[in-house]
Image (cartoon, rainbow, N blue to C red):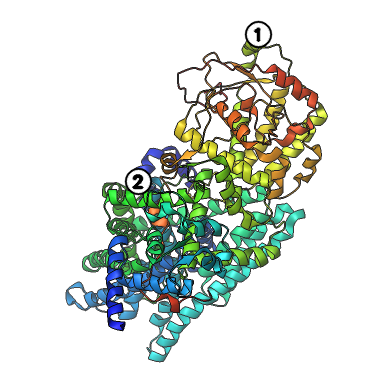
Amino acid sequence: MGAAQSEGRAQMYQDLADKTGFSTEQIRNLHSRFQYLTQDEDTLRREHLENLTNLALNPIKRQIIEAFFDKRNLGQNEKGCLQEIGFEEFVTVLSVFRPPKPRTAEDKNKTIKEEKLRFLFNMHDTDNDGVITLDEYRRVVEELLSSYGTIEAETAKAISDAAMLEVASVTVGRMGPDEFYEGITFEQFMQILKDIEIETKMNVHFWNLDTRTMHCGK
Amino acid sequence: MKNAAKSGFNVYHKITVWVPESCLLISLGFIVGGVMHAVRKEPPAVVSSNVFFLYMLPPIILDSGYFMPTRPFFENMGTVMWFAVVGALWNIMGVGISLFAICQIEAFGVQDINLEENLLFATILSAVEPVAVLSVFEDISINEQLYIVMFGECLFNDAVTVVLYNLFNHVAMMEVDEPAVILSDIGGFFVVGLGGIFFGLLFGFLTALTTRFTGKVREIEPLVIFMFSYMAYLIAELFALSSIMAILTCTLSMKYYVEENVSQRSCTTIRHVIKMAGSVSETLMFFFLGVVTITMDHEWNWGYILFTLFFTLFWRFLGVLVLTLIINPFRKIPFNFQDQFGLAYGGLRGALSFALAFTLPNSIAHKKLFITDTIAVIIFTVFIQGITIRPLLKLMNIRKTNWNLETINVEIHKRLMEHTVAGIEDLCGQWSHYRWKDMFVKFNNRFIRKILIRDNRPESSIVSLYKKLELRNAMEILDTMSGDISAAPSLMSLHEERKNTSKPKFLTSDVANMHELLSKNMYKIRQRTVSYTNRHSLPNNNIAKEILMRRHTTLRRSLRSGTFNATNSTRSQKFFSLPGGQSLNSGFPAGRFQHTDLVDTESETAYPSNRPTFRHQQRSSSKAVIPLRPLNNLREDNEPNEEMHYRTSHPKLKFRHSGHQTSRRYYGTSRSCSDADYEEQQSRLPPHGWTEDPQNNVQHPLMRKPH
């Protein structure tokens, strides 16, 4: 049983590795991490992630957790959320954070960048309508600022208003007197954030070592 | 004379784009040296060891350390230290040993230079000088990592060099080489370095703590900073520790806290003085280099010198290649080949090398040879590498970073990104520097800030950026307001014809209130982000001060004319929402102002719900006039429903409603004006603005006459 299982597993790892671009050792490590998180169950649910102490201090913890269950991040063109995910989905979501190889072609870089920006976009756009409205943006800003103690709601509001207007001016320019700005679409999102070199910054180094022995605490 | 020369240089900016300033300075030194030589005069012996190390070096280091962008530095600290320390050692060993090998060859006739002297010489040559290279880097907007690694490496490399210089000097002078002594010297190297760091931190802490209490005696703040930094240098020197490390660490650690505690004026003073002192020192050194080159008796040895040149280049390139190879896997953004080339080719030698060579003890037989050689290397690198590096880098298409990303969206998303990555890393059970950063920030907020900062309110960088942008908006308003006076008379008629308005009446008490408010608010807001700067210019931090200066004039003018021109604003970068034409929320409690003697976050509440203002595209061919209500035009938007607010404000995106342009809510002063004024002004504005002019006149929003 052991041999067959490990062979089947190796095959699964290989498939996943091909699909997501990780190496097989990284997949193996992620699998052990997955099992650790789910306490050896088969699927991951929100409660499992909520219990991580380190994550608790993160101001946008909720969005991050949601991102794992968001169907849009799982490469499917559907909308909505899942209640639980398996290892494959887990790895798919994490593959967004893979650092690009040093010599990737220009267009590949663009797709990677788009993937990452899409991830962020989905974090904002919680109602899945493809646009970030003022409310959604505001919520994110509030959460971001919440770690700094007492920030007036007004401030967050003002800042998100400013940001929205910024986007509007840059992307749409002048608008007619009766038009109003619905929200930020993905193209506009990409346009305003095109300079922050996201493909180099939004990466996680997935070590090839067993990470379980390296972390402290949960 | 040097000053005249320097101002001359600044005029010929075009030249300095292609030819680094160091080149020009050295050339000038040549000229003067030539003159002196012709007149058979000896150059004044200004540079003795003491003078250099005690008076000229500290300002240079202080300058570099103070203007080092701390955030990128800490993110790349590992790489920087790696290149600085290990790189320096590699270079020294490599060059020293190869030169020693060369010395063995009889043909060159320098057999009497022993190993220690060679190593000493190699140490002198390893001191890399960042000035010229960094200005080129900045000019071509090179990617941030390379910039910071270059900067940091040069800086810490100086520290390593000086320590090793002293070490080898000591060793070279000794007759007997006992291994035990050598080993203890190596151990001493670490002690010296770490000791320097310790003293630096200590003094940094002391300085920050002192500035906490200087609230009542603002004038001495700059003095405190300089004194403590210099003391850090001296005391470390006293204990035979690395004084450069001490002053560097002191500067790096104290800057953040000091800039929060100190008044705006002091902040500016400090920056200007440091910049000036550093520049003067540097200039003097290069100039002196030029003079000495001409006037000194040189000992020239073709073989030795040529090989020196060759080896320095060779080992630097090799060093960078090998070191990058080792450290790239640990970096999030690995260095590609162009980066490495830039790093290697940018290794110019400069003032420090020269000074170290010049102050060699006379007991070294070939001192003159060393000096000549050093000068040769410096001139080669500064002139040839310095001039060619710019075209080469451009040719190689090196990776660039857009450094002008100061928009709210970018800042928000940077934060978002960092938190996301930190979250994912936590999820995967990995540590990264985000985790350290987070931990440090928490520690900072909980303990250190409480001790060191006077009015402690931790603030998000998003909020501070937002305020900075508002401040800039405000400044531009004032800026343009000041330009309208000459237009006033002719436009008055136009204005009157358009509406029967009366000028805003400002009661004197209102004006006084406004002044007070403005000053308090402006003083409080500090721009924390110091931009990368080149050697001879300071980051543009004058905004707050200028606003204060300008508001005096503009307030007076606005009282008189009450109008100003509106034109297009195509600073599309700033867009802050503009509420529709609702009347000012008179319900806004005037009492809020009292809070203004505060700190940054609280000052936010002083602005009526801080709604950002929007600058829109105003087009008016006929210079339509907009009634100036700069200071009381705060339309409060107290719409409970955000959608509505958004919608109504939106059309303003396009238009130019008369009063809107001036609604810089920034000036919380409006509240002080009577409501009656507002209502009146409100009704004045015709809802339809000017006709839109299709010509896109890229000009400042509120038209500046003289331009």
Query: Are labels 2 and 1 on one chain?
Result: yes
Left or right, B287 with reference to A53:
left
- In this rendering, would B122 be left or right of B49? left
Mark 2 vs mark 1: give the one in front: 1
- Residue occupying image coordinates x 65% and y 29%: B663
Q: Amino acid at mark 2?
A: Val
Q: Is residue B118 above or below residue B346?
A: below
Q: Residues within 10 Å of mark 1 (few under 14, many from 20)?
A: few
Q: Is residue B170 above or below residue A58?
A: below
Query: Height in image: B434 above or below B473?
Result: below
Q: Chain of mark 2?
A: B
Q: Where residue B301 sits: x, y (%)?
A: 24, 67
Residue receiving disc 2? B19
Q: Position of residue B185 (x, y in %)?
A: 44, 83
| Type of amino acid under label 1 | Glu
- Specify the subunit that label 1 lies on: B
Inspect this view and state whether residue B16 appears: yes
* Residue B457 lies in quadrant: bottom right
Residue lying furthest left: B107
Which SS class for mark 1? helix
Q: Which of these two is toward me, B350 or B437?
A: B437
Q: Would you say residue B535 is visible in this rendering?
A: no
Q: CA distance from mark 2 to mark 1?
A: 58 Å
Mark 2 nearby-residue class (10 Å; few <14, some 14–19, many ≥20)? many
Q: Which mark is residue A179?
A: none
Question: N-terminal of the two: label 2 or label 1?
Answer: 2
Quick check: B400 above or below B422? Answer: above
Q: Which residue is mark 1?
A: B497
SS at mark 2?
A: loop
> Residue B417, percent across and down?
48, 55
